[in-house]
Image: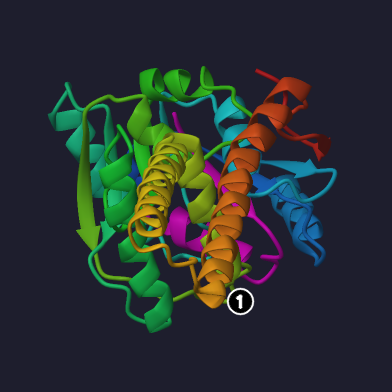
Amino acid sequence: MLSIIIPCFNEEESIPLFFAAVEKIKKELHTEIEYIFINDGSQDRTLEVLRDLSQSYSHVHYLSFSRNFGKEAALYAGLEHARGDLVTVMDVDLQDPPELLIEMKDMLEVDKDLDCVGTRRTTRDGEPPIRSFFAKLFYKLINKISQVEMVDGARDFRLMRRSMVDAILEVTEYNRFSKGIFAWVGFKTTYLEYKNVERVAGTTSWNFWQLFSYSLEGIVNFSDAPLAIAFVAGLTACLLAFLLMGVVILRTLIFGDPTSGWPSLVSIILFLGGFQLLSIGILGKYIGKIFMETKKRPIYIVKESNKQER
């Protein structure tokens, strides 16, 4: 069986188009399929569309959250409820071309040692230039400061064997960054490249600041480099301060001149004060992550579902 996990947030227009596109290639996959739609607190008719679809097709299942928990929670919920030997994650807006599933499945059948076939975009046509610039910058940065490598342009769209899915489910942390988790669990993965595809309907719920915040989550979740940078910068500032104090004392003893330069002194104080606040903010971000983990809150809450528990 192939389980297809589809997170949805205000996607009433895209769902029928997505379902029709996948059903069109179903025969070529030569396997049984189950759809697991995750309604992540949508405010439109997404839930009504999923209800109608599930009543018409027995292999269509849905989970509806009690509120919006975010895409990461939706992915985890889908993985928890997937029963297939093969599991894939797809966006409902058809930016993940369904026809690639055929080639991905063939690659897994040919190479028995292969655990996962992922996808990556070779172009970002249609995206604002500033978003593309910061996306590339993020991957360069995260790969320098993290212990796991994240492929530039990699999508959540991937076809995984059950063994890899089970390993991902063992990572039960509340603060989730799936791209990093996919890389962290390891397993042999290869990537299919394709050009960017525009949405078929609706509008994206991700804006620049949400993506920026998401990238910060990835950095904090998979690297302690910001803490190390704050420590090194603070240590450097202390050493420079001691050197400057020595210069001031020697100048006073030798030349007997009072130390001048109040504007420069105020500037230095403001700089160091700002840097201290920045360091406290970085530390607070990590402490906040620890705080949320210790609460042991559920990653998501299901309000309605037609899917039986595993």
Task: Say if 169 sits above or below 139 in the image.
Answer: above
Q: Position of residue 139 (x, y in %)?
A: 32, 54
Q: Which residues are magenta?
A: 1-25
Q: Is residue 22 left or right of residue 107?
A: right
Q: In the drawing, does residue 306 fall left or right of residue 92?
A: right
Give residue 303's quadrant in the image: top right
Q: Residue at x 80, y 65 (%)?
A: 45
Q: Position of residue 222 (x, y in %)?
A: 43, 36
Using residue 253 as the reference point, say whether residue 109 is left or right of it: left
Residue receiving disc 1? 203
- Judged from this view, the residue extending furthest toward the left is 110
Viewer-side residue, 216 vs 71 = 216
Assign the C terminus to one quadrant of the image. Answer: top right
State the image coordinates of residue 173 (x, y, percent, origin top left).
Answer: 59, 26
**In which image quadrant can residue 43 be found?**
bottom right
Assign a secondary structure to mark 1.
Answer: loop
